[in-house]
Amino acid sequence: MPLRLAVRDIAFFERPVRFVRPFRFGAVVINAASQAFVRVEIEVEGKGTSVGASAEMLVPKWFDKRPQLTPEETVTELRRSLMIARELYLVRSGFDTAFGLHACRVAAQTEACAKEDIPPLAAAYGPAEIDKAILDALLRSAGVNFFDGMMGNIAGIDAGLSPDLQDGDLAQFLAGRKRLERVAIRHTVGLDDQVEGVGGVADARENTGARYFKLKLNGDPEADVARLIRIGRQLATLSRDYHVSLDANEQYADLTALGALVDRLDRDSALKPIAAKLLYIEQPMPRDITRQSPLGELSRRDFIIDEADDSYDAFPAARALGYRGISSKSCKGIYKSVVNATRAAKWSGKGEKFFVTGEDLTCQAGLGVQQDLALGALIGVTHAERNGHHYVDGFGDAPAIEAQAFLAAHPDLYVSDGNSVRLSVHDGDLLTGSLTAPGFASSVHPNWSALSALPQPKARTKEQAI
């Protein structure tokens, strides 16, 4: 049964995260970033107060790729998204369900961010992080874990933001969930990552035994094909079966260029180690072009949207264009992931195939990776991009006492190598058993005293932004 609550306080913190190797996707190279942390205090009706938390990377140049903006300016947008959302969530409006609080603020958040030239995908970041922390606090107050709580719809998710569904569709979907005990990792191969030899794609020390691989594309069909042929040769040497997905991060300019790539996948025998194992192609074209470009005959291959998923109606719109899937990312909103998973299940029940995938590389050890992993394990994501541990050394610059606390609380998910605590991969899988503690997938919270206050950028008008 849904519980009602009121938000009493929201605080933001930040921690720098250094990468051990550069990560290049599209036209962006990241060597370091910051991780945002949210702490909320709520009052649950009839139950008193409770504290919850969430964490997420402030990824530059993903939520907003406009070329005129610097990487730091796009991170500033995310900080502003958090600040704007905080003001909206702290408006005293009485008790409501967790989803109700979210639903009645979505439009206001998008509108307020638009006045500062912050696009919808970045606008969603603030509510997404606050919602996760609120849910954590709610579950802790009720003394239930994420999976049991969501199966009972403790957040009160309804069809208010998805008129193509009915309340019963969502309730039925949630009630029928069963936690996945294992979720396979998908190893991402960035555009600057080594392909051959030691440290390459087939090196078990690098891919940690993964059976799924995500290969980045740069938008040039010929260059992409040449690189995919090299990667395919390496993957063909693996002693285990494997599958791949391709991710263009909006780099393909139009359907003509995309068609050239798909044609080579269909016809070039040198690409067989990739084409025969290909599950789907992710976000090939820029988000503003996507909605104007029906896939047509290209839909013989499965495509999904990611960056174009900037609203609750994005998946139905993509479906009409020939897309079969959509990504789940807790940084885009946990409730939207549940809604989209419900849609995929309902649509697939009519004989067609639709699906939701897990596509968040930057989830870091601790709250970030645990909450996103739990979300996927709830809605049925059997394999997920989990390469944050590949680009960051375990818990990074987090205090050792914090890393050890997470290790002690979640010994099936982490392992200590003597120098650092990092994700523990079991035959290519992550285990979810310890994510069943009361709260949102974590028994512990970060060491708040070791975090810095999130910088508070000033509001700007759209004219100032331009």
Image (cartoon, rainbow, N blue to C red):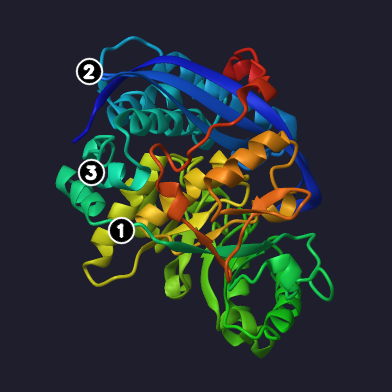
Mark yes or no: residue 432 visible: yes
16 relative to 384, above or below: above
State left or right for residue 365 relative to residue 359: right
Residue 273 at x, y percent in the picture: 63, 84
* First along the sequence among labels 3 and 2: 2
Residue at which label 1 appears: 178
Residue nearer the viewer, 130 or 122:
130
Where is residue 192, by image quadrant?
bottom right
Residue 156 at x, y percent in the picture: 24, 35
Q: Nearer the viewer, mark 3 or mark 2?
A: 2
Q: Which mark is residue 167?
A: none
Residue nearer the viewer, 83 or 112:
83
Disc 1 and disc 2: Cα gap in Å? 30 Å
Q: What is the secondary structure assignment of the residue under circle 3?
A: loop
Disc 3 and disc 2: Cα gap in Å? 19 Å
Residue nearer the viewer, 97 or 284:
97
| Residue situated furthest right in the rendering | 198
Three-letter amino acid code of the residue under disc 2? Gly
Residue at which label 3 appears: 152
State left or right for residue 200 relative to residue 65: right
* First along the sequence among labels 1 and 3: 3
Q: Residues within 10 Å of mark 2 (few under 14, many from 20)?
A: few
Disc 1 and disc 3: Cα gap in Å? 12 Å
443 relative to 232, above or below: above
Residue 373 at x, y percent in the picture: 49, 51
Three-letter amino acid code of the residue under disc 3? Gly
Residue at which label 2 appears: 46
Residue 138 at x, y percent in the picture: 34, 29
Q: What is the secondary structure assignment of the residue under circle 1?
A: loop
Three-letter amino acid code of the residue under disc 1? Lys
**Quarter containing the C terminus:** top right
